[in-house]
Amino acid sequence: MRRLKLTITTAADGSATAYSPRVAGKIHSVQYVKTDYADGVDFTVTCEATGENIWTESNVNASAVRYPRAATHSQAGVAALYASGGTAVMDKVAIASDRIKVVIAAGGNAKTGALHILVDE
């Protein structure tokens, strides 16, 4: 596994955008380590090239760990489901020679926090 650590400081309006280095693999987890972002901070974490969602959550007040997964599909484009319950089959989000884009809103004036993103290479 590879750990990408992004320490991000917000602007006066509480917003920030940051990018990881290029990476390839499957996203294992996103760990938010609260330093002093305001309560209620909003995160949008995506793949830069495609915009594929990795983690989106609003009104986060404390450090958090998320294990993002994406729905899978058959070759015909039909959602893959577990036969008995109709529950979606999920898998880790894959990324190939792309950067992870982090957009923060409502983080407070000149506040800092960190995201640790684990990528299974």
Image (cartoon, rainbow, N blue to C red):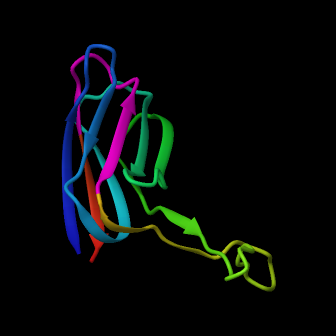
Residue 4: x percent and y percent?
20, 58
Whether 97 is drawn above or below 91: the answer is: above
Please check the rendered image and state whether residue 110 is part of the magenta-colored stretch, yes or no.
yes
| Residue at position x 40%, y 23% in the image | 106
Q: Quadrant of the C terminus?
A: bottom left
Q: Quadrant of the N terminus?
A: bottom left
Whether 108 is drawn above or below 36: the answer is: above
Q: Is residue 76 left or right of residue 109?
A: right
Region in magenta: 99-113
Q: Based on the displayed image, in which of its 4 quarters is residue 39 positioned?
A: top left
Q: Nearer the viewer, residue 21 or 65?
A: 21
Residue 60: x percent and y percent?
44, 36
Residue 10: x percent and y percent?
25, 25
Whether 58 is drawn above or below 6: the answer is: above
Q: Based on the displayed image, in which of its 4 quarters is residue 47 positioned?
A: bottom left
Q: Is residue 26 left or right of residue 59?
A: left
| Residue at position x 23%, y 51% in the image | 20
Q: Total label count?
A: 0
Q: Nearer the viewer, residue 49 or 37?
A: 49
Residue 52: x percent and y percent?
49, 55
| Residue at position x 19%, y 53% in the image | 5
Q: Is residue 60 left or right of residue 17?
A: right
| Residue at position x 34%, y 25% in the image | 107
